[in-house]
Amino acid sequence: MIRSLIYLRNVIWLNESYRPSYMRATPFFGGLVMSVVNEKLKEKKVKFSQIVVHSGIIAIFTLTFWAQFYGTVFYERNRPYYPLEHALYSIITHSTWPVAGIWITMSYFTSGYGILNNVFNNRIFTIMGKLTYSVSLVNITFLLLSQSSQKLPIHMTSKYLFDSWLSDAFMCFLISIILYLVVEEPFRKLTGKLFYQR
């Protein structure tokens, strides 16, 4: 196990895995389209009511989590294989978070979130935003370690997926706080003093 974690090129499922471009590019192209649409909506001064904004968030996040947790049905024993269901699930599950991000940015930059603006402008959200890069750095490493350290076979249930998602998110943020405080922030200050100080 240690050898496979040190030499990730030796892990066959990681080395030979390929995700088609339409799966990888969905968030990227979604963000590009959203920036253009967002500018057009700002020019036309389009504003959504707070009921539309909040009901849209609830609906989109409900559909997003439902689509993510629907994957547990594929782990049921002796379940028949339906190619159309798998194809639709693959497309939908790779576009859920981009759609949620599109709605959040469109709502925020056109109408705002009303009372929730005070919550989003809170200091804790600023800190969470600063940790985004560190979380993206430690995420895959921590997921590989947490999944590789399991000794017994596991059964993918909705409860297991939710619990593992919650614990993985908590641990990723905890590790990224350490990474941010020990590496990123000191080097940012050092770079600022060396190159940008006048």
Image (cartoon, helix red, strand yellow):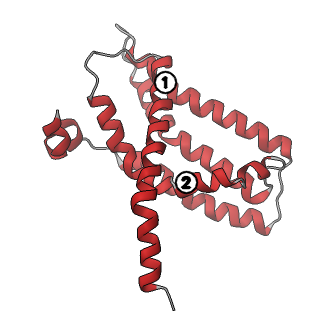
Disc 2 or disc 1, which is closer to the eye? 1
What secondary structure is marked by label 1?
A: helix
Q: Quadrant of residue 36?
A: bottom right
Task: Name the residue tied to disc 1.
Answer: 163
Which numbered tag is attached to residue 48?
none
| Residue furthest out toward the top | 78
In whole angstroms, how far apart are the C-alphas of marks 2 and 1?
29 Å
Q: Where is residue 171 shown, x and y percent of the image?
A: 44, 38
- Tell me the number on the disc at residue 30: 2
In-front residue for pair 160/17: 160
Q: Residue at x 40, y 49 (%)?
A: 24
Image side of residue 128 versus residue 26, left or right: right
Dot 2 amino acid type: Gly
Q: Secondary structure at mark 2?
A: helix
Q: Quadrant of the N terminus?
A: top left
Viewer-proximal residue, 26 or 161?
A: 161
Residue pictured at 72% horizontal, 34% vertical: 58
Q: Residue at x 49, y 37 (%)?
A: 170
Q: Are marks 2 and 1 in contact (CB under 8 Å)?
A: no
Left or right of 197, for residue 115: right
Position of 84 with respect to 149 (left or right) is right
Disc 1 residue type?
Answer: Asp
Mark 2 and mark 1 lie on one chain; the one further toward the N terminus is 2
Q: Position of residue 11 (x, y in %)?
A: 17, 38
Res. 25 in view = no
